[in-house]
Each structure stands twice: as C-alpha cells, then as structure tokens.
Image (cartoon, helix red, strand yellow):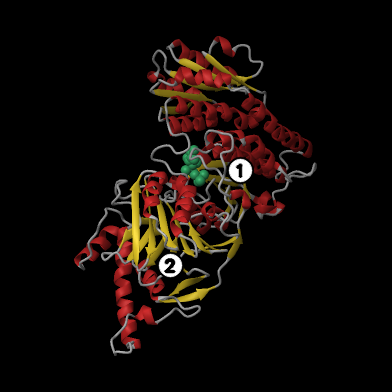
Amino acid sequence: MCGIVGYTGSRPAAPLLIEGLKRLEYRGYDSAGIAVEEGASIKAVCRTGKIAQLEQSVTPLHLTGACGIGHTRWATHGEPTEANAHPHLACDGSIAIVHNGIIENHGELRRILEERGHAFASETDSEVIVHLIEDAYSMLAFEASEEDDLTDAAGMRVPHTVAAEMSAGEPSLLAQAVGMACGFLIGSWALCVMAEFEPGKIVCARKESPLLVGCGADGVHVASDVTALAGHVEQACVLADGQIAELDAHAFNVFAQDGEMLTKVDADLMVLDARMDAADRGQYPDFMLKEIHEQPRVIRDTLEDRFDGTRLTIDELGLTHEELNLIERVYIIACGTSYHAALVAKNLIEGWARIPCEVEVASEFRYRNPIITPSTLVVAVSQSGETADTLAAIRDARIKGAKVFGITNVQGSPVARESDGVIYTRANKEVAVASTKSFTGQIVSLTLLALLLAQSKGRLNQGQIRLLFSELVDTAAQAEAILRDVQSVKEAALACKDARSAMFIGRGMGAAVAEEGALKLKEVSYLHAEAYPAGEMKHGPIALIEPGFPVIAVATESPTYEKVLSNIQEAKTRGAFVVAVATEGDERIGQHADRVILIPKVRDALSPITAIIPLQLLAREIALLRGCNIDQPRNLAKSVTVE
Ligand code: F6R
C-alpha cells in the first residue's frame, strides 16, 4: 500500500514522478505529493485525492529540478488530508521523505522528538522518520566537521558535506543518517530521502516494504514496483531488507548495515519482465473489463508447456517426484480473492490427490499455531506477491520447517523470492483494483498443482490426467463464448442495481464462486453482499430475504445441482429475486429463477473458471449503473503491504 517513486538525472523530475505515480496509483489513491530540488531548496506539493489533482497543481509551477521523490498514499495513520500527505519535511524544510509501510513505535518516537524541539506538521506515523534523520544528520555532520576540522580560505569552518564529496563506495552522511534513523524504527518501511545539502542525491532504505532501483539512459530511478520503472530501466535491483541505496544522477550504490557502519554490497540485478509494463486499456472503457476479457488468454498462457501428452511438469516447483510423493498435508494461505481461489483448490487437491488440504486466511494462520511437519506443503497464493499477511505467514511456515511454494503474478516479488518454488500465473500486469484475471490464473495454476500431486501420488492415471488437462485447455474457448454474449448479465444488473444488499449462494465449487462473486460486488458497486453455502441459508441468513431481495445462485451442473435448486426455491418462496448462473441446456432453472445466465457445460471440478466470469461482469455492470469508479474503488489499494 502506498506507492513511492524517485528520480535523479538530467531530465526535469516532476513529470517523471507524476507519470510514475500514475502507474502506481493502484497502490493507494487517498492523496499524493512530490518533492523536487529547485535550486538550493526543496519544493514540495501535496494534494488529496488522485494523481490527476496533484498534476493540475504541479503543472503551473514549472518545476525544472532534476532530482525528486513522490508518493501516492493509502491512509493508515491520519486521515487523507493535505497535511498528512507525503512528502514530509524536516523542521527547516531541508530534508524530504516519502514512506511506504508502518512505523509501529511512532507514538513513543514522536514524544521524544517533540521533547527535543521538533515540530510535527502531520498526524502520520511516517513523519517521525524525517525528524529522526534530521537529528542523526546534525549529529554526524557535527562529528565529521570536528574530525575533519574543515576550514575555508578565510579560516571559517565549512559544512562537512560541502567539502567532503562522497568517494566511490563510501556512503554519504545522508545515507549514514538514514541508516542511523532506521535503527530506531520498529515496523516496515520503504523510504526515499532527499536533502538540500546533498544535491542530486536520493537515499533509499527498505525493510519489508518493496523498493527497486535501476539505472536508465538519463538518470537513476527508484520505485515501489516494476510498473513505475518499466520503459525507464531494463534491469533493477530489488533492495533486500535492511539495505540502503544511494543514488546520484549516474549510478547507485547499495549498502548493508554492519553494526554502526554501512558496508557496500553488490547490487543484485534482475532483468525486468516486459509483460509487467504499464498496461494500456486499449479499446476498453476500464481496466476491469479489459482484464475480464483477457481471461481466455490467461488460461492458455498459464497452461503452456505444462503437459507433454504423457506427463505433467511444473519445473519451477523445485520439488522432485519423490518429495512430492512424501507430502501428506497441504496448507494454502492467501487473502481476499486469492483465498477464494484457494477454496477451489482445496476441493481439487482432496478430490484428486486425496491429500488433506486446509485453506486459511493468511492473517489468521500466522497468529495460530498450525500443525506443520516436514511432510506439510504450504502454498502461498498472492497476485501482487507482496501482501504483508501472506508474507508473514510464509516466513512463519518456513521457520516451522515447511516447504513453501508460491503462486504469484509478479516476477521477483517477495512471495516469489521467499518461497522454495514458484508458479507465475502469467496473467500479466493487473491494473484494476478488483482482481479478475489473476483469480483465473490462480485457479488454473492451483488446478495444475492438484493434478501434479495426484500424478505423483498415483491417484490419477495418465489417461485421466490427459483428459482433465485437455478439458482445462477447453475452458479458454468456453470463457470466450461467455464473453461474446453478455445480454443476460446486463439484464440481471439492471434488475439488481437499486438493491441495498444481495446474497450469493452455491454448493461445493459453487460455494467458492459465490464467495468471489460477492466480494466483487462489494468492492466495485459498494452494494452489501454476503455469500453462503446454499445449504447454510436456512440456518440464519434466510431471515434477510424479503420481497425483491436479490439472491445470486451458482447453479451449474454438479452433483449437488438438485440441492441448489431446492435452496433457490426456498428463497423464491420468500420473495427473493433470483439470478441463476446455470449450464446451457438446463431447462428447469428458468421455472425457478427470475433471470438466468447460461454458460457452457464444464466438468464441475473446472466450473469455477467459467462460472465466475458472469459474476465479475455482473459486479462491474451494477457498479457502472450506480456510477462507481470501476478501476479504483474507494478505500481500497491493490497491494496490501500493511498487516
Ligand atoms: C479483490 C482483491 C483483494 C486481493 C487481496 C490479496 O479483488 O484484489 O481481495 O485478492 O488483497 O492480494 P494478493 O493476491 O496480491 O495477495
């Protein structure tokens, strides 16, 4: 959450920073700001709301400085006001910082700093950082000038930094001050810092929140993620926890804290994946619709090169056939939409591989004491690969001795780097905050994993795997067919748009699809929605039903179809307005549902891949009719890097 960018080079920084922030806007859009070096001082501009607001304020200022930092905020501590927007400045305005993360001990630090005379301008946790750096810098500069006894021609003492140019490989005083300040912090941070007395430099630091640095043709760039670097640099260094980087217009050095010293370390460069470039909406009115339409391609790409007609392979897994065979229990940990993909996988892993599989929300998993043995495989599912709770759960599982396998969409993301093996979902960059195509990529990847486990355990034979794989491939064409005819979805949306609440029901695979359908509706249309396994409705939620109350039922062909039909009737009897997602050729459903959305016949085990599509479209359509912001729903951010 929150996106940060920085640039130092030969071009005006402000337009580059704004462009970078636009690309990172999905990480938070409560407020935004930039700080640019203008002559001998730092000029900061902050605005509440979207980057467009900031851009309008910056344009007339004609900022020309070639070094700057920027931030787009998802508010945690302090309301989304201009005062709480980043960059935050030191008391005398000589240092500016942008921060992503949470400083847990900010209350105590703030009290101490205020006692020392620092004046705070915001309610944020982040502001303590700039005041700590200010103090650390003054102390280091004083010590250095005492040591060096620097004097000018007239015998007057001159500031250390004016005289002491950073020699190759030596950290500047600012970098040392940042290192020292970080030593007082508890929490997580990705930081960019600039100071009037270190012109043309940016110092960055990282703990738990992502930060990448790369050299381009006309300067050095830093950003929270690859998206903002794409097109500017070809390779980037993903800073590791505890590292500090110092950038000037031509190069950057990376340092690790070594006691009180900063020691230069080699920068570990990664080639950027061109597919993660800033995406283009093309002919679509919003990214969500574009990404829904990309799902057939995601299915095909995710399945490419996985089955040679005889055996299924996932080389990235990093587990041998023997190791796979030893797995006796699977935990899948994830959040939000990724958690719903995991619910689908539980049915497949238990059904096909006959391995007990538990699915848990990452934020709960890590605070329990789950039973993990050497034969437990922990699978972490995360589109962004940087969800704080999922990462914490991975670390916890590894400490307990589990093998951790990541399923993510982002190359080089923390989930990818901290897992023993990884499958990339090949969804490419997902921009809309509400996940759609990455859900599909996750289900397809998890289906492959379930098949692989079944293959290793000898629970499915070659012929069965071949058949299932070919049906999996077929879902791409079936998804295309659904996307060609959306009239029934539009009609259902019109009928539901004025509701205040809706219930989603389904059984088995349909229950997981119902969960995801309800989440999509809540996120993009702000309409309250609840999902229940259809059989649970009579145990309480049915009390909510009154005439006209929308019940969205996943009633595709499955072993529990008859039961779902009965549940639909129970709702209908009480006046519900029923929208059913059902299988083509189903002639009975029309007698019970008010609106029917038909989808091609797919085996029940694979049905979530296609059944979710009408529900994604329904949520978007209702949101459109209600005038909501489709790609950037209120209060949300795409990467959830706080716990
Ligand atoms: C919903 C959505 C969120 C994410 C959740 C986990 O549309 O996008 O619920 O699924 O925040 O994010 P990742 O998958 O990046 O770990």
The residues bearing labels 1 and 2 have C-alpha atoms spaced at a distance of 33 Å
Kindly identify which residue carries mark 2: 203
The circle drawn on residue 427 is 1
- The amino acid beneath tag 1 is Ala
| Residue 490 visible to an observer of this rendering | yes
Q: Nearer the viewer, residue 182 or 160?
A: 160
Q: Position of residue 226 (x, y in %)?
A: 54, 54
Marks 1, 2: nearer the viewer: 2
Q: Quadrant of residue 128?
A: bottom left
Is the residue at mark 1 in contact range of ligand 1, meaning its CB lies under 8 Å from it?
no
Q: Position of residue 257 (x, y in %)?
A: 44, 72
| Classed neighbour count for the residue bearing mark 1: other residues with Cα under 10 Å, few (<14), some (14–19), many (≥20) | many
Between discs 1 and 2, the one toward the N terminus: 2
- The amino acid beneath tag 2 is Val
The relative height of residue 410 versus residue 155 in the rendered view (above or below) is above
The relative height of residue 221 versus residue 514 in the rendered view (above or below) is below
| Classed neighbour count for the residue bearing mark 2: other residues with Cα under 10 Å, few (<14), some (14–19), many (≥20) | many
| Residue 354 visible to an observer of this rendering | no
Q: Position of residue 525 (x, y in %)?
A: 43, 29
Q: Quadrant of residue 350?
A: top right
Q: Of helix, strand and loop, which one carries label 2?
A: strand
The circle drawn on residue 460 is none
